[in-house]
Image (cartoon, rainbow, N blue to C red):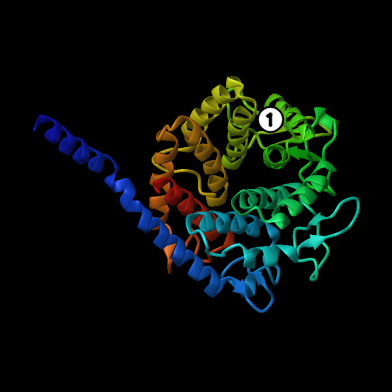
Amino acid sequence: MKNNLFLIVTIVLSLATHGNSYAQLPAYKNRIDLLQQQINNKLRDTAAGLFYETTDIAKNKNKHSYLWPLCAYIQAANEMEALEPGKDYMSPVVTAIDQYYAARPPYPGYQAYVASEKNDSRFYDDNQWVAIAYLDAYDRTHKKSYLEKSEMICRFMLGGLDTVAGGGFYWKEDDKSTKNTCSNGPGILVLLHLHKITHKQTYLRTAIQVYNWVNKTLQDPGGIYYDNINVATLKIGRAKFTYNTGTMLQADVLLFDITKDKKYLTEAERVAAAGRSFFFKNGRLPGGYWFNAVMLRGYQELYKVDANKDWINFYRQDADAIWNNERADNMVGTKQTKSLIDQAAMMEIYARLALLEK
């Protein structure tokens, strides 16, 4: 009898502890569905196989979106497919991204705007974000094209790596003035992921080389990351954005997973604590939804290792506040005009939170 009573109490306490969390799963899924519906209704040019930058199409700078919002949308689509196996959310976004392909020397890659509409610069980070999503998709599907395109992007980005200012990737192919955390953090992730798939040691060696340079050059003593270094003056651009901390946090965890060296896990937990303390103020994260989505990837990776719910709970709080307070007509954003990148970012966040609930 006592054993049965103990079992009942344990179940009740478990439900009390986790009930609210589990109840969020359908809520997250519903939010994703509503956002996806509005993207299709207001931000998709079906005839062209492309997307619009914002809902105020008449005032958009260009006819169609830059590649950057699609970097957010392709990752969101991957997480949505992971949440709903058998569904196809990525194909329309892949079709759009293909239209940014520019096969100019020295290596092919994706330019910042639709290639058929104008020639544009090629950003190393834009390409890296696409590769990260494609490599995640390859892990799920083993679809060869995802790996092939990621390897193509890796060849392109390696063309932006040199020893000026001590090392690191440039941000932009045709502008050698800065090297940014936002082109080095994701570059490390691409290299580490390709190493895990192919087992080529050159990927790992290069990743560690860049990782060491970023930590030496662009990390503040507390663990947060600065934005960039000017290669001519060596002046540090001291702005701090969530996504830079996120990519380096994720790199720490992946390096621990690959090498089993606990120094990387120790650093991951230091960076994670610093990131939450610095960016999460008064119950909210900063306003850049997509920057925050990228940072969540790092915390999710760490959570898989140490199961510390503190890394996830503050994201739930912020994500709920956005839905409750920064939404109109089932689109998120603090401005009247809604953007593709904001919708995609929150779809990714809600999908990741839903996957964690599952």
Q: Residue at x 81, y 67 (%)?
A: 118
Q: Amino acid at mark 1?
A: Leu
Q: Of 283 and 184, which appears nearest the observer?
A: 184
Name the side, left or right, on which 262 lies relative to 349: right
Which residue is tagged 1? 218
Vertical placement of residue 160 versus 233, above or below: below
Vertical placement of residue 299 versus 320, above or below: above
Query: Total marks drawn?
Result: 1
Q: Of 199 and 210, which appears nearest the observer?
A: 199
Residue farthest toward the bottom in the current orientation of the protein: 47
Q: Of 327 and 35, which appears nearest the observer?
A: 35
* Residue 324 visible somewhere in the drawing: no
x, y percent for residue 241:
59, 40
x, y percent for residue 326:
43, 57
Where, by quadrant of the figure, is residue 225 drawn?
top right
Name the side, left or right, on which 209 lies relative to 311: right
Q: Of 196 and 21, which appears nearest the observer?
A: 196
Q: Residue at x 56, y 70 (%)?
A: 55
x, y percent for residue 297:
55, 42
Few, some or many residues within 10 Å of mark 1 (<14, 14–19, 20+): many
Q: Quadrant of the N terminus?
A: top left
Q: Residue at x 60, y 30 (%)?
A: 257
x, y percent for residue 348:
52, 53
